[in-house]
């Protein structure tokens, strides 16, 4: 599966007030501006539009009317992106300060659509983000977009240079050469996992493995060359042998306001660190992929981000 990491560099033109976790704010503003950038019919609902099956916004943001290979592990295709907002919980930003973020794009089609996303970022800067101050949201200017250390955007000309070839992610069963018995995962943003239709407040290794397999298989099926050929049931069963050695996870509640549903919504999840011990070698490629892709629910907001630490 093709995979791109794009760093978006911006400078605030006004004072800004933003929530401690900014994923919902960035995603909401981005969605509105992407629709403004690409929508030609200006219909309120995508389902009523003749162009829905050909529209980048509908495919990217609404996940409407697109063809994919059905998967037994998902009822609907996953979105082909993750927005990673600034990790800082800072809420007040003065004019002139940087407010950089990243967008992860999955699949070859989404890499080609980068100019539309950059256009949407420009519109975000013009319309502003955050709370209204003096009848205006905080505007920003786009200063650069980079990938793989290469600058793509020239703010003087508002032109994009050609991107390097995107990265390619694969997952194959491996024969371990090193014995690894202990790893620690640090969850940087809330992890929301459901089992038996209930959110989980604990993270046994087998639950983690199920979530990783689901995330990787559905993304590769929808935006890559198909699901990896893995022993899914066997991997979950063998994961029961791995034990929790130290659990420093805690439930972190996050409330966001949904303008679409006109109500406050709870989006809490697990944060902190957890250490596992046991036969871990066969799971390391899967875990390292999960680091890149995020796991759990609401990944488009940047949730489910973790980093692996191994001795």
Image (tube, rainbow, N blue to C red):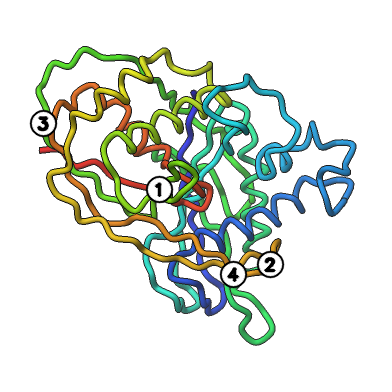
Q: CA distance from mark 3 to mark 1?
A: 24 Å
Q: CA distance from mark 1 to mark 2?
A: 29 Å
Quadrant where the C terminus is found in the figure? top left
- The mark closer to the camera, 2 or 3, is 3
Secondary structure under tag 3 reads loop
- The mark closer to the camera, 2 or 4, is 4
Side of 232 relative to 38 (left or right): left
Where does label 1 land, which residue?
Answer: 304
- The mark closer to the camera, 1 or 4, is 4
Of 28 and 197, nearer the camera is: 197
Side of 13 relative to 279 (left or right): right
- Is residue 101 positioned above or below 92 on the image? above
Label whose residue precedes the other's in the sequence (3 or 1): 3
Where does label 3 land, which residue?
Answer: 181
Of 70 and 186, nearer the camera is: 70
Label whose residue precedes the other's in the sequence (4 or 3): 3
Residue 264's disc number: 4
Residue 127's disc number: 2
Secondary structure under tag 4 reads strand
Q: CA distance from mark 1 to mark 4?
A: 21 Å
Expressed as whole percent of the image width and height from the top left, the position of residue 165 reads 49, 26
In terms of image quadrants, where is residue 233? top left
Label whose residue precedes the other's in the sequence (1 or 2): 2
Mark 2 neighbour density, 10 Å: few (under 14) some (14–19) many (20 or more)? some
Of 100 and 308, nearer the camera is: 308
């Amino acid at each position: 599966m093709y995979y791109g990491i794009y760093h978006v560099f911006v400078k605030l033109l006004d004072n800004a007030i933003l929530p401690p976790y900014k994923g919902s704010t960035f995603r909401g503003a981005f969605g509105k501006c992407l629709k403004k950038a690409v929508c030609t019919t200006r219909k309120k609902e995508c389902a009523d539009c003749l162009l829905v099956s050909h529209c980048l916004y509908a495919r990217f943001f609404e996940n409407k009317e697109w063809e994919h290979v059905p998967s037994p592990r998902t009822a609907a295709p996953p979105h082909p992106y993750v927005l990673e907002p600034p990790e800082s919980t800072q809420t007040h930003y003065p004019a002139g300060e940087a407010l950089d973020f990243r967008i992860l794009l999955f699949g070859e089609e989404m890499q080609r659509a980068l100019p539309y996303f950059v256009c949407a970022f420009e519109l975000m800067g013009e319309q502003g983000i955050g709370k209204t101050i003096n009848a205006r949201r905080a505007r920003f200017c786009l200063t650069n977009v980079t990938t793989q250390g290469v600058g793509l955007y020239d703010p003087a000309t508002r032109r994009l240079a050609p991107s390097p070839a995107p990265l390619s992610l694969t997952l194959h069963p491996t024969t371990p050469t090193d014995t690894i018995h202990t790893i620690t995962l640090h969850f940087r943003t809330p992890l929301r996992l459901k089992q038996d239709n209930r959110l989980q407040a604990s993270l046994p290794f087998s639950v983690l493995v199920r979530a990783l397999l689901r995330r990787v298989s559905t993304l590769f099926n929808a935006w890559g060359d198909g699901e990896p050929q893995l022993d899914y049931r066997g991997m979950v069963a063998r994961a029961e042998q791995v034990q929790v050695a130290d659990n420093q996870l805690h439930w972190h509640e996050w409330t966001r306001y949904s303008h679409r549903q006109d109500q406050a919504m709870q989006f809490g999840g697990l944060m902190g660190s957890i250490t596992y011990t046991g036969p871990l070698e066969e799971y390391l490629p899967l875990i390292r992929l999960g680091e890149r892709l995020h796991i759990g629910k609401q990944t488009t907001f940047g949730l489910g981000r973790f980093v692996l630490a191994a001795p």
